[in-house]
Image (cartoon, rainbow, N blue to C red):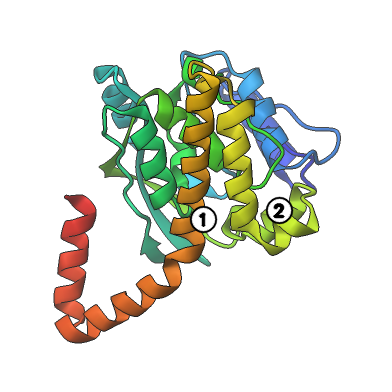
């Protein structure tokens, strides 16, 4: 799905069309923004399973096969993804966070997701088309967060560390301010992105997203308020004191022991 690119994307894609009939290529007449373009790609698809991949990302050779086997083998899963590895200028930089949402309670999965989400590489995981259709992307800041939270409400989310999604940092999604500007967001959303995300998440649960419609109005209001509070607590109120605590622990334990404990906590 070519969002009116200005480089050689069109010619490269049309050459691949001649080599493989399974490939479909669509080009926007003008740039419609990131999330509308993602939505357009979804509407053009027809498979039982679905995933997106950004133009500057790439996958391990067995990524799709491993994710398909995991998703089809566990009907309670709504989303399966590999571990994200990030690069800067082609050089490896860091490993992304492995997020696993395995609770049987859908509300708890959503709250845990908002507590842990940062770069949200899970957006590029493998999902069932039927589940994704219940979480339409909106033209708002962090629409990808709202989308994955809807999937987490429908089923468990698993990060497979045996395969990797490789991502080049520095793109639009790496900068929330740039992303908000690209979406035509208000000055408020650009200046206070996490407060805007909290408000969008609140409205998503309360009104917008069809996936939460099974809740009655009082329960939906209560859950929406919890989601709003979770986003603010985890992204705005807690990070500053947590950084002080982390630095103190690292100094007290030593960097090597601190890293060992941190990895055990993340994976287990």
Label 1: which secondary element: helix
Q: Residue at x 14, y 75 (%)?
A: 257
Query: Residue at the location (41% across, 31% down)?
Result: 152
Q: Residue visible at 36% across and 71% down?
A: 242
Query: Is 45 placed above or below 244 here?
Result: above
Give the percent coordinates (x, y) of residue 20. Answer: 56, 23
Q: Which residue is mark 1?
A: 232
Position of 57 with respect to 143 (left or right) is left
Q: Which mark is residue 193?
A: none
The residue located at (68%, 34%) in the rendering is: 138
116 to the left or right of 178 = left
Indicate which disc residue 180 carries.
Answer: 2
Up-down relation of residue 205 to residue 265 (above or below): above
Res. 170 in view: yes
Looking at the image, residue 5 sits to the left or right of residue 230; the answer is right
Q: Nearer the viewer, residue 73 or 267?
A: 267
Q: Earlier in the sequence, mark 2 or mark 1?
A: 2
As measured in the structure, the alpha-carbon distance from the residue carrying label 2 to the one carrying label 1 is: 18 Å
Question: Dividing the image into 4 quarters, which one contains the N terminus?
Answer: top right
């Amino acid at each position: 799905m070519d969002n009116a690119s200005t480089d050689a994307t069109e010619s490269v894609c049309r050459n691949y069309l001649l080599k493989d009939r399974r490939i479909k290529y669509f080009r926007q007449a003008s740039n419609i923004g990131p999330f509308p373009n993602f939505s357009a790609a979804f509407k053009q698809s027809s498979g039982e399973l679905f995933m997106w991949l950004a133009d500057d990302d790439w996958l391990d050779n067995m990524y799709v096969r491993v994710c398909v086997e995991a998703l089809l083998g566990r009907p309670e899963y709504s989303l399966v993804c590999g571990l994200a590895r990030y690069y800067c200028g082609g050089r490896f930089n860091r490993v992304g966070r492995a997020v696993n949402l395995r609770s049987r309670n859908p509300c708890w999965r959503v709250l845990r997701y908002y507590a842990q989400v940062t770069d949200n590489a899970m957006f590029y995981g493998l999902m069932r088309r039927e589940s994704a259709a219940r979480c339409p992307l909106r033209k708002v800041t962090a629409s990808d967060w709202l989308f994955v939270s809807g999937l987490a409400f429908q089923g468990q989310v698993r990060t497979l560390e045996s395969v990797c999604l490789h991502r080049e940092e520095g793109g639009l999604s790496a900068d929330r301010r740039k992303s908000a500007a690209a979406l035509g967001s208000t000055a408020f959303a650009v200046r206070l992105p996490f407060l805007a995300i909290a408000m969008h998440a609140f409205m998503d649960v309360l009104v917008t997203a069809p996936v939460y419609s099974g809740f009655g109005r009082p329960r939906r209001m209560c859950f929406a308020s919890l989601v709003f509070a979770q986003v603010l607590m985890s992204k705005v109120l807690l990070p500053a004191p947590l950084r002080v605590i982390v630095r103190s622990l690292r100094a007290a334990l030593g960097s090597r022991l601190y890293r060992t404990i941190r990895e055990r906590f993340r994976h287990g």
